[in-house]
Amino acid sequence: MKKLAIFLILSFSQLLTLYSANVDSLKVVADSAYAKEDFDKAAKTYLRIAKVGESATICYNLGNCYYRQDDIARAILWYERASLLSPGDEDIRFNLDMARSKTIDRVIPKHEFFFFTWYHTLTNWMSVDAWARLALLFFVLCLVSLALYIYGQQMWLRKTGFTLAVVLLLLTVVADLCAWSQSTRLANRDGAIVMSPSAVVKSTPSTSGSDLFVLHEGTYVILHDNSLNDWAEVTLADGKQGWIEKKLIEVI
């Protein structure tokens, strides 16, 4: 049994090594193709890496490849995926905004309460892993401060330890909430991009439904109901709702 466990561990380790080497070699090929401005080859190679495991860097590189090929819809799609994985990255945000500026539709978001705007800004400051690490750091410091309060020999030291413990506990809760929010966004993936040059949004999930409005490629929509096979109910940032054929959109 012990030998079997060692064999399995060694086999798994070798597989990880081979996987890492394969990904690294593919990235070298993709980076080289991009440097030579062979964006089609670079995109296809980056896609092979992304199918194995998404990362903010690979998604960002794919966005750049499609942007350089004037495929704005796919550029936005991959920039959005990169932003989902690394929401605090300013380069990703800049390129995403630049790609969005080339879309036809101009959707003005509804006004929201300032608290929600502040919360979304705070949550998107860092990735889920970064928030989780920060929460762990705050918690450890909270325990240290609590130890100062319990074992401190001087009153000022105990008061300081108690105050710091309370503050750090609150910061731990905030960081955990931000990590949970980011994790939920990654798990749900309720955003999508219109990939067709034009897409008619219907009043019902049927081709016989009334036409409500037309969307164009690159427009961001929120999936409200994705349970049907061929149709999805979507919401725009300005509050408009309707049904769109799933084949015309791609989930972020």
Image: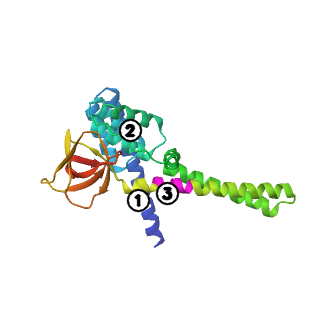
Picture coordinates of residue 228 (x, y %)? 22, 61
To which quarter of the image does residue 170 belong? bottom right
Q: Earlier in the sequence, mark 3 or mark 2?
A: 2
To which quarter of the image does residue 67 belong? top left
Instruction: Identify the residue shown where x is 39% and y is 45%.
Output: 110
Q: Are marks 3 and 2 in contact (CB under 8 Å)?
A: no
Picture coordinates of residue 166 (x, y %)? 70, 58
Disc assigned to residue 11: 1
Q: Which residues are magenta?
A: 175-182
Element type at mark 2: helix
Picture coordinates of residue 155 (x, y %)? 86, 58
Picture coordinates of residue 250 (x, y %)? 27, 48
Instruction: Identify the residue shown where x is 33% and y is 40%.
Output: 107
Residue 211 vs residue 80, the one in the foreground: 211
Which residue in the protein does label 3 denote? Answer: 180
Residue 103 vs residue 35, the one in the foreground: 103
Q: Amino acid at mark 1?
A: Ser
Which residue in the protein does label 2 denote? Answer: 60
Q: Amino acid at mark 2?
A: Tyr
Q: Label 3 vs label 2: CA separation?
A: 24 Å
Task: Say whether residue 25 is visible.
Answer: no
Task: Say whether residue 121 is visible.
Answer: yes
From this viewpoint, which residue is outermost toward the right?
154
Instruction: Identify the residue shown where x is 25% and y is 39%.
Output: 217
Q: Is 76 on the left-hand or right-hand side of 176? A: left
Nearest to viewer (mark 2 / mark 1): 2
Nearest to viewer (mark 3 / mark 1): 3
